[in-house]
Image (tube, grey):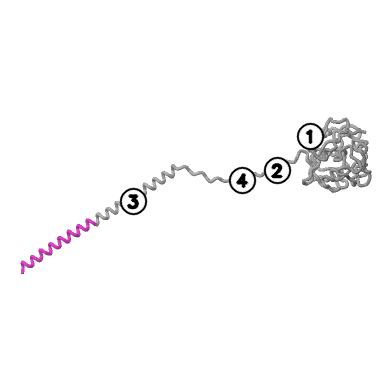
């Protein structure tokens, strides 16, 4: 019985030793697996760090992209300046060669002009505003330009002397009489443009230098308060009323374009 027991004990010890060996072996295996996982984690962390450093370096050395182009603001179109000496929104009235003196024209006859004592005769007759043949008076062809006007300035004073302000006239030195007579202006209303020659003084005023040659408003306070008288031909060409509003400016003779105002051009110096 004792031998059998010893044998049994010996067997149990052997099994116990084997179990311990297996446990030791398994523990060693588990430790190795954990070490591998730790190494892999460290490697992954190192790889991630390397990639992050490379990305940061690439970003630091890459050129900064240019900002998106901002379209420039449109530049407003420049406002065209008014022609030199232009007068805008001026009241115009109609007058004519041979007009009789009455209350409608402050009792001023137009058989004579300020610079021509024989204006009606030199023109060729009465420039009837109501009986027309085209831009001419009915019944005769005028000897002088039917496109004429008056402005409130006379370069000759009441004593027959030339005023100092006459140096502003469009035809300085051209005549022994008036340096204003026969000068040209451009007249504008809407799309209509006409040209006419200076043949008389008015409306009413005769020394309104600051208006005629400057930028002031007309001095005239009588009647319609007009600053420009125009002939029946100008009225008809521009379809103006007896009282209207226009713009005007002086122009040189060489700048006057072809048109009905050039069919007959007045060159007479006038005189008394």
Q: In the rendering, at what x and y percent does residue 244 appear?
A: 83, 47
75 or 139: nearer the eye? 139
Residue annotated with mark 3: 44
- Given contact means CB atoms under 8 Å apart, are the residues at marks 1 and 4 in contact? no
Residue displayed at 24% across by 57% down: 30
Numbered circle sitting on residue 73: 4
Query: Which of the 4 image quadrants contains residue 123?
Result: top right
For the residues marked 1 and 4, what is the alpha-carbon distance in whole angstroms? 42 Å
Disc 4 secondary structure class: loop
Q: Which quarter of the image is occupied by the N terminus? A: bottom left
Q: Mark 2 points at which residue?
A: 79
- Asked whether 163 falls inside the magenta stretch, the response is no
Q: Is mark 3 on a helix, strand or loop?
A: helix
Q: How crowded is mark 2: few (under 14 residues within 10 Å), some or many (20 or more)?
A: few
Q: Is residue 137 rendered to the left or right of residue 89?
A: right
Under circle 1, the secondary element is helix
Considering only order in the chain, which callout, 3 or 2, is on the residue closer to the N terminus?
Answer: 3
Counting residues from the start of the chain, the first of labels 4 and 2 encountered is: 4
Whole-percent x, y for residue 114 in the image:
90, 37
Residue 65: in sight, yes or no?
yes
Residue 254 numbered mark, or none? 1
Position of the C terminus, as image quadrant, is top right
The magenta stretch is: 1-29
Q: Please tell me how crowded label 3 is: few (under 14), some (14-19), or many (20+) other residues with Cα within 10 Å.
A: few
In-front residue for pair 143/155: 143
């Amino acid at each position: 019985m004792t031998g059998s027991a010893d044998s049994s004990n010996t067997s149990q010890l052997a099994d116990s030793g084997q179990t311990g060996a297996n446990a030791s072996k398994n523990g060693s295996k588990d430790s190795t697996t954990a070490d591998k996982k730790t190494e892999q984690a460290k490697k992954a962390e190192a790889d991630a760090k390397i990639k992050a450093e490379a990305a940061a370096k690439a970003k630091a050395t890459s050129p900064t992209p240019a900002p998106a182009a901002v379209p420039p603001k449109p530049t407003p179109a420049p406002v065209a300046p008014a022609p030199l000496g232009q007068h805008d929104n001026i009241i115009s009235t109609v007058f004519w060669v041979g007009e009789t003196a009455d209350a409608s024209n402050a009792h001023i006859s137009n058989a004579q002009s300020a610079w021509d004592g024989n204006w009606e005769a030199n023109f060729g007759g009465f420039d009837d505003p109501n009986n027309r043949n085209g831009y001419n008076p009915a019944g005769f062809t005028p000897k002088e330009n039917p496109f004429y006007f008056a402005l409130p300035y006379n370069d000759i004073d009441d004593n027959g002397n030339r005023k100092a302000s006459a140096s502003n006239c469009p035809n300085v030195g051209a005549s022994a009489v008036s340096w204003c007579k026969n000068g040209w202006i451009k007249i504008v209303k809407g799309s209509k443009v006409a040209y006419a020659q200076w043949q008389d003084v008015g409306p009413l005023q005769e020394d309104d230098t600051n208006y005629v040659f400057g930028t002031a408003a007309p001095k005239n306070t009588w009647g319609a308060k007009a600053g420009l008288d125009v002939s029946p031909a100008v009225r008809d060409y521009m379809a103006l009323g007896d009282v209207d509003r226009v713009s005007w400016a002086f122009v040189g003779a060489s700048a006057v374009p072809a048109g009905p105002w050039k069919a007959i051009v007045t060159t007479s110096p006038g005189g008394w």
